[in-house]
Image (cartoon, helix red, strand yellow):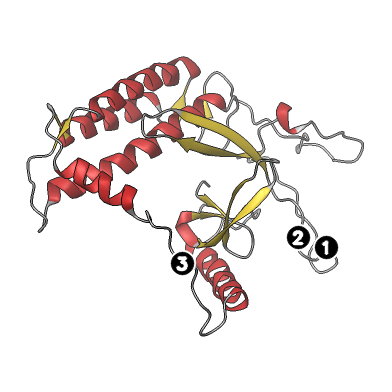
Amino acid sequence: MGGVPTNYKGQVITMGADGEDQVVPGLYSAGETACASVHGANRLGANSLLDLVIFGRACAKTIAEENKPGEKIAELSDNAGEFSVANLDAVRFADGTERTADIRLKMQKTMQNHAAVFRTGSVMREGIDKMNALWKDMETIKVSDRGMIWNSDLVETLELQNCMINAQQVIESAEAREESRGAHAREDFKDRMDEYDYSKPLEGQTALPMEEHWRKHTLSWTDTKGKTDLKYRPVIDHTLDDAECKWVPPAIRSY
């Protein structure tokens, strides 16, 4: 399952310049929104409440360890929050030709038709082209309500900005992933591509390098124009204490 990447302590992580995990100080995530990279602790194979309780508790313990009562908070930069305020005003006073609801509907239909559960590369590439065109429509969006009280037009447009980023990352990462895994079922790549053949005993097998298999996490970055960059992070396979709990290898899903 996808989500905000975290370590087992609930700390949000990103990828550093050296390609290694890098903690984002002060930012935590747990439950439905997080991806802790723990085999079995996911929203399909386990209960969401279990995920939330385990990693929610980990967040609380880490926050208590990292912070002390009365500790001074670092000074904010002089321009802290300016980008968010500028974006809010730009959206509120947007006076283009494209209505929020029209762009949202096109985005929804594009994702439904080109990034459904059963998908092919050519269909998704066509969808990416359509999504790229929608980003140009976002530059000419129109918001009619200029008010600051119960402005649903403004709220829906801000939500659309988030939806556009999510949709772009979903369809581009899916097109790049040339395998089938879980709810990602490609008609042109029907098999799962792991570093080992988990349908056979692992003894004697040599693991494929990360570049040659797809049992890895996709990390994605999208700018304000819709340009999306993809990188990959290995799945965490080891446990905290191998003597107490050994690693459980994945199994091929079969019926």
The answer, for residue 65, to whether it is visible in the render is: yes
Numbered mark located on residue 131 in the image: none
Residue tagged 1: 242
| Quarter of the image with the C terminus in it | top right
Quarter holding residue 17 = top right
- Please state which of residues 249 and 151 is positioned toward the viewer in this rendering: 151
Amino acid found under the numbered disc labelled 2: Thr
Residue occupying image coordinates x 52% and y 69%: 56
Residue tagged 2: 239
Q: Secondary structure at mark 2?
A: loop
Position above or below: 143 against 190 = below
Contact flag, marks 3 and 2 (Cβ < 8 Å): no
Q: Secondary structure at mark 1?
A: loop
Residue tagged 3: 75
Residue 67 % position (x, y): 57, 76
Residue 74 % position (x, y): 50, 68
Quarter holding residue 9 = bottom right
Residue occupying image coordinates x 44% and y 18%: 125
